[in-house]
Amino acid sequence: MTRLTPSRRSLLAAAGGRGLSVSFMGRAAFADDAVGRRKFVTVVARGGMDGLSVSPPVGDPDYEGLRGRIAIPAGAALKLDSTFALHPALAGVHALALKGQARIAPAIASPDRARSHFEAQDVLESGGAMVYAASSGFLNRALTAAGGRRIEALSVGATAPLILRGPVQTASWSPGPSGEGSPRLPAILADLYAGDPLLAPALASGLQTVAMAPTAQEGVGDMSAPVDAADDGVAGFVRRGQNTARTLGKTVAGFMTQAGGPQIVAISVDGWDTHANQGAAEGQLATRLLYLDALLMGLNEGLGAAWNDTVVVVATEFGRTARINGTGGTDHGTGSTAIVLGGALKPGGIIGDWPTLRAEALFEGRDTRPTLDMRGLFKGVLADHLGLDRAALEGTVFPDSGAAAAVRGMV
Amino acid sequence: MATPNDLNAAIAVTRFGLGARPGEIATASADPQGWVRRQIRRAGADRPQEAPETSATRIKAFRAYRQDRRAMEREADGEVAADRDPVQIAARMLREDTAVDFLARARLAATTPAGFRERWTLFWCNHFTVSAVKLLTATVTGPFEQEAIRPRVFGRFEDMLVASSAHPAMLMYLDQAQSVGPHSPAAAFLRRRPMPGVGGGLNENLAREILELHTVGVDAGYSQDDVTEFARALTGWSVGGLREVEDQQGEYVFRMPAHEPGGRTVMGKTYAAAGLDQGLAILKDLAAHPATARHICTKIARHFVADDPPPALVARLEATWKATNGDLGHVAETLVAAPEAWDPAPRKLKTPYEFLISSWRAIGGQPGAIEHIAPPLNAMGMRAFSAPSPKGWSDEAMTWAAPDAIIKRMSWAEGFSAVVAADLDPSPIAAGALGARLSEPVRKAVARAESRQEALSVLLMSPEFQRR
């Protein structure tokens, strides 16, 4: 005998009724609150993104000499001002910069100086003053610090990045099938997970995101579809990668623009550890930057009108050596570039000071000297854009960060 | 009525091992500790393949592809038939070679009666990560594990460290193969006659990661100067190229002309100029450094027992490590004998690989094709042979318990159950997979499920099956 089975969606509502879900109902409570519309996306570029290629200081007299054959030629770079340009792969970001909707912080670093990927990423994402100073992510603590207001957060990827880990359960999503299975299984598991501090909230949050996914993916295209059947070889490979990145950006935007969708999103982008043959206007690093640009443009396009309420920060754990190394690449360094973009941004020049690449200005004789603390940049955005108060920022979100003054007035 | 031995047998097979195959817990219950201990053997790990392709063969094939590709780019200017397109050939090579190795490894894990031996081995493969994320090393992860790691998992740590650091896969993965001493004859030659694509200088990647990840750890107090000095000492450690004699191609070679002349100082100790022996002497000292014992024993305890490992267990492992000069067989014996390791609370969440492998073990099966295992691992964030960085895969629950990952596990469990559940009797499967660890609510939920498929899905997704 066949019997009607409830759809998974109605089951989700049922699961919500048992107090399993904290957020099935969305955030109608502050829909008309201006802060409630604002969105913040952090893109963590893992591996040590080379700031001197992202925003090449082509007007700095020492740039070409230090960089040799990996210097971005001034003729190919996309000019920002008399000193700085953007890498030619960042055409989308450059177009936004010309409209006053993208700025660079060209000499920024976390407080960590060990040149270890893993330690530096921990410090960047935990918001601590030093490694192991905090075991949760600063964005998670920012969610708590937002006071009574409930802000939804989403990380993109199958594994949970430290930046969003912590006491507040946050959603996560990654591309791939999570098709309609037995509608009974989630409810049975929800029962078995009751009281399990790890699995219960993860399942509840996951089910909620699954319910939102179809809407988020409406009209964004298929990530795996070939761009063009004849598009083989390296160029085709790169174009497919760009397509995937752009579609990912649009899908994330699709989540963010739904009622009850996340206001805060964290995305990781890997592959920046260019020790050998990093290339210049074209090559290994240029391909990564094409993907980054496509991701950001996908977000921009997908957010539509909501772009005007959005700030995006692209940050990395450290920059790379100012000098080309022995193998056509660069080794672990210190200062790098962060990109800040969004329709909510006020126009302006570079964020922070440029220390120059003169030999005596280099940090320990080898790296871009940081003039701006990454925590100051994030503090400024969290204060001006999301309305976090100073006490919370200095106390719990970025403890012991008194020396890193908030960069105010960007939004 | 469950006896203490029943619970210990379940712990032996699911925590120390890779999950229970039907009947395995019953076998272990006579002597759970002995069941684990007897898997430790001087000969090292099992071999996933009897006659695998060597890394040298794979490296030569990849280099041949690159030569073809350059030649074709010169000739054809983009117009290449699909069956001769080097990118497509490379893609096939990467897909098929890697698939053969990975499937063999997964099938060994799913079927071995020595689950502890394989788990211990996988720990070391992860400690000395060579990831397939780089095109250059995409096909050599399997051969690296087979050649450098598996024979030495119960031997001396120093031997494994040297084998890993001198293996062509590691030398290419961490860019050592191209590193040239700035004052070496080779650098002088390259300055006179520059070659396109050949740098002729120092690359410090391998030196840094040996210090930070493989030996003493990031908080051991070394400086940037120590990294640079160690990198200088390692110059000359390379991989035989197409100009070398046939039997050195794709193999480890030491090139004296590329070695930085002079003595070196690393972490306060000086090393005379002695070519290859200089780097070897530094590796030997790093292996014997007390910070290395602390760093790695903490990782072992974290892998087997808890994300936040009991200090008493770390101390026991460290004591054995120091007393035996890093004899890994003895360290393994200490782990097995440690009471902290038998705490009934299952504090480790399985990684996606552990989850999939233990699911096959639970039904007495094994993956039959790469499609059975690579796509779900990918969806759960653990792409085959492709750890995101030299640090390897995370060993912490918070990494793997993202909401999306739990949903992906659930979807996979349903699909897997739909395929395999028809001929299975779920209740005995549950009892066989978890033994005395099976809780009453889960036993009941399995028994009350409306179909075999649902019953198996519930078992695989149950809290006690997700943990170990």
Image: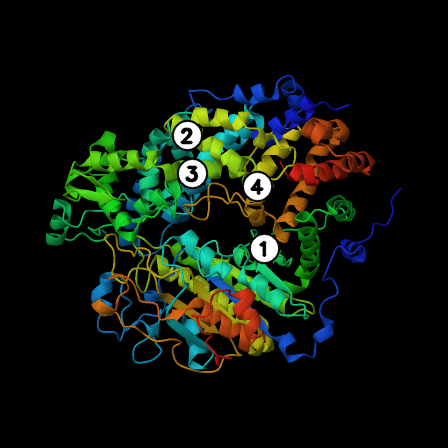
Answer above or below: position of A215 versus B19. below
Gap in angstroms between the C-alphas marked 4 and 2: 27 Å
Looking at the rendered image, the disc whose residue lies closer to the viewer, 2 or 1, is 2
Disc 1 from disc 4: Cα separation: 19 Å
Label 1 resides on the chain identified as A
Point out which mark residue B321 bears.
Answer: 2
The reply to whether the C-beta atoms of the residues labelled 1 and 4 are less than 8 Å apart is no
Of the pair B18 and B342, the residue shown nearer to us: B342
Name the N-terminal-most of marks 3 and 4. 3
Q: Amino acid at mark 4?
A: Thr
Q: What is the x, y in percent for residue B98?
A: 45, 38
B86 relative to A155 in the view: left or right: left
**Which residue, given by chain and number where applicable, does mark 4 sit on?**
B351
Residue B322, image quadrant: top left
Question: In front of the other: label 1 or label 3?
Answer: 3
- Return the x and y of residue B80 as percentages of the image width and height: 36, 51
Rendered location of residue A160, percent (x, y): 56, 53
Mark 3 and mark 4: Cα distance apart in space: 24 Å
Q: Amino acid at mark 2?
A: Trp
Q: In this figure, which residue is indicated by the disc labeled 3?
A: B294
